[in-house]
Amino acid sequence: MPTPFRVSTAGPGGPVLLTLIYDTLTWKDEHGIIPWLAKKWATSEDGRDYTFALAPNVRWQDGQPLTPDDVAFSFDYYGRHPYRWTDTTMVESTTVLDTDQIRLRLRQPYASFLEDVAGIVPIVPKRVWSNVADPSTYGGADASVGSGPFKLAEYRPAEGAYRLTANPGYFHGSPTTRQYEQLNVPAATSVQAVQQGQLDLSWGTDASVNELFKGDSRIKVLATPPLSVVRLAVNTKRAPLDNKVTRQAIMYALDRTRLAQVITKGLPVVGSAGVIPPETPWYDPRVRSYSFDAEKARALLRGKQYAIELLADPANREPELLQPMLQAVGITLAVKRVDSATRTQLLREGNFQLGLVQHIGIGGDPDFLRRWYSGTEANDYAQGSIFSNAQFGQLAREQAVTLDEAKRKQLVYQLQAILADELPTITLYYRRFYWTYDSTKYTPMNTWGGLIDGAPLVQNKLSFLRR
Amino acid sequence: MARLIGRYLALAVAVVLLNFLLPRLLPGDPLAAAAPDGISPATSTLTVQARVQLRAYYHLDQPLFGQLLSYLNDLAHGNLGWSISQAAPARDLVGERLPWTLGLLVTALIVSSVAGSLLGLLAAWRGGQLDQTVLTLSSGLAAMPEFLTAIALLLGFAVALRWFPLHGGQTVFASDPGRNPDWPHALVDVAWHLTLPALTLVLATSAAFVLVARGAVRSVLTETYLTTARAKGLSETQVASRHAAPNALLPVMTLFGLRLGQVLGGAIVVERVFAVPGLGLLAYQSIAARDYPVLQAVFLLGSLGVPTVNFGLELAYRRLERRVG
């Protein structure tokens, strides 16, 4: 039962599904933030008040009109029952101004509010949820009523499969896709399933699908920007990695181009030392780069020998490639393989030296850099982010409340510069998601800064609508 | 009798305690586990505020003993708890998966026990070249890891030949308008989907039945009562089926019972390779997600299966012994 309170906590499959059933105040297309439930908005001088004017004639899927009361209720309700994928605690109060206007007052200005909050939090019908005391168990017939382009027709919990049907009364017009089914399919055979016509869309991180379907008239491949990162989380509190020179030496010692090439089988996208990936809105192209130079690494280490332990998942292939590269400069890498839940815990407890992690969520609003490294909360947002740097903390807090985009960009560039010099995480390489699809059925699309919050997912609701 | 009941009660308590403890002994946190097989998003994980709330909701903020008390209290009320990763009652999740595992594993078990025993019987009875061939083949099959058989079948019959589907237990949403809604079609659809997984299990388990049946029959080949039966003018088939086969029945039955007891544990490897939505796959997913309530429910079912089947087996033995004796 996908409701904003009851979808699986694991992975972005749930939140994406919610974007098809529910709507948000703002949305994103290929180029940036666009009006959605809110047809326009204004920000007060102090940056704390957002006044949204709602689009006319928006209806819930049961035919009732969507009103500012629903919007106000949603934010109030999320205050008591937190939305699992984005923080809404910065919203101090909600005021309905008019039959089509609402004002949200924030505790303090929040630069990524339009993208990360207004663009992510699903608006829910007050009528349904105002009577529900425990939304995590509520599964009434009206629990999945949204205002989005698709309605939930069927949910098969055993298979984890969802069937959505087009909402003909959608305020942006009826979707061109009549039916959307989301199925759980083993990754190993999902490309074959598209080839055989059993699926219309599937994803992977292996670039060899490009070669496989080159010149195919029916099956095409859409590559996303490099929004998935593979990196080493570094425990900067433990010797010898507490010394930034050691971290820099490791960066020089690694032939990350080869690493990316071997594993993704495509054109490598080498990790930016400033974490934010190229081809995304906030990337600083002039950030310090570390090209492979074993000689330089040895010089930095001054002939010292080290033994370092790396935490990795059993299926990771990177450790075998990293070992000889580090050995060549005098670092012996001991690899400890644990399953991902165990690794997460060890990273969270700070019980590690290096941890190999891979994840998405780095291509959207750059405020994630603040959340990663903001002290006690940091490890909940980003595994193993241990880094205390006063200047970084100061700049990170400043960018979060800076509404002037050009000014904010400079601050975010400075954050990248500090990360690139200090290296609290060693970004190995980025991965694109390769979406294999049947072009006679559907055409997926890339979203500015990634779908939702930097996710390389291509089922933007706009791709199902006539535009 | 009282002692027997006491022993079973002690066993039940031990099982429940172990089921509670084992998942919690695993390192890892149900609220931080990454998506199995999937993408582990950094920013799409729970917000701090949501995490605190969920921790309290699932009693994860209590000490272990407190958690045990809430678990026992829930269990006493027939409540298996709520899944943490899937936000649904654990009972429902297990209930939906149970028919798949039962259907797949029991079918495979019946086919492999019948086919395996017959083959073992035939091999022992005929001896010679046939016996050698059957022995070699079944030893070879028994040595083959299940996942290898599964992948070979998948590559051969689903990817290359396209005779069977690549994944799943049925065509999901087959009952949509415009597709075949009636049950004979649905049954054929399920059978079509489960052929390769079932075949994998049959190949993996029938070897044991071949060897057991063959051994049992061989041990009586020189018995005088078989000579007597032949002297009475019975045909070879009659001698084999009426006098030799019943001896094989007891060990085959034992093996069958042992395997049946394990059915409720699901078939993790096969269910995972073919994405059959059974209990094995649920257990796998729940371990990856550290989903304690679901793990407890799956383990409870799996561990109760063994004593239940043992009891049934005990009754069956008594009947058989009377007949054989």
Image (cartoon, coloured by chain):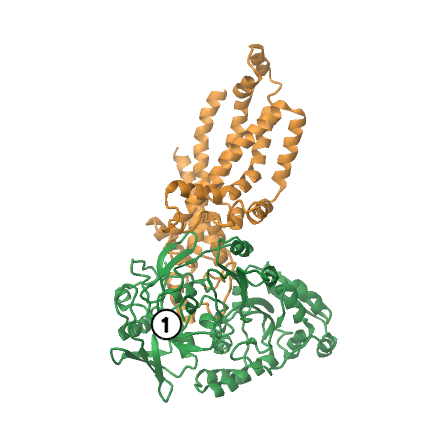
Chain colours: A green, B orange
- Left or right, A412 with respect to A306, comes to left
Q: Quadrant of residue A213?
A: bottom right
In the displayed structure image, the side of residue B67 where residue A297 appears, left or right: right
B211 and B14: which is toward the camera: B211
Viewer-proximal residue among B11 and B161: B161
**In this image, B168 relative to B175: left or right?**
right
Direction from residue A74 to residue A456 in the image, left or right? right
* Circle 1 chain: A
**Residue A422, picture quadrant:** bottom right
* Residue A219 visible in rendering: yes
How crowded pointer 1 is (Cα within 10 Å; few <14, some 14-19, many 20+) is rated as: many
Residue indicated by mark 1: A24
Which quadrant would the N terminus of chain A be assigned to in this image?
bottom left
Out of B94 and A240, give the one closest to the viewer: B94
The residue positioned farthest toward the front in the image shown: A217
Q: Could you say which is closer to the camera, residue A75 or residue A310?
A: A75
Q: Position of residue A80 (x, y in %)?
A: 33, 70
The residue furthest top is B232
Q: Position of residue B158 (x, y in %)?
A: 55, 47
Q: Give the amino acid type for the residue marked by disc 1 in the picture.
A: Thr
Q: Position of residue A308 (x, y in %)?
A: 65, 68
Seen as rendered, the residue at the extreme bottom is A45
Q: How many marks?
A: 1
x and y percentages locating residue B277 in the rendered image: 46, 49
A247 vs B155: above or below: below
Say what secondary structure mark 1 lies in.
Answer: loop
* Quadrant of the snapshot with the C terminus of chain A: bottom left
Q: Is residue B102 visible?
A: no
> Residue A5 sits in which quadrant?
bottom left
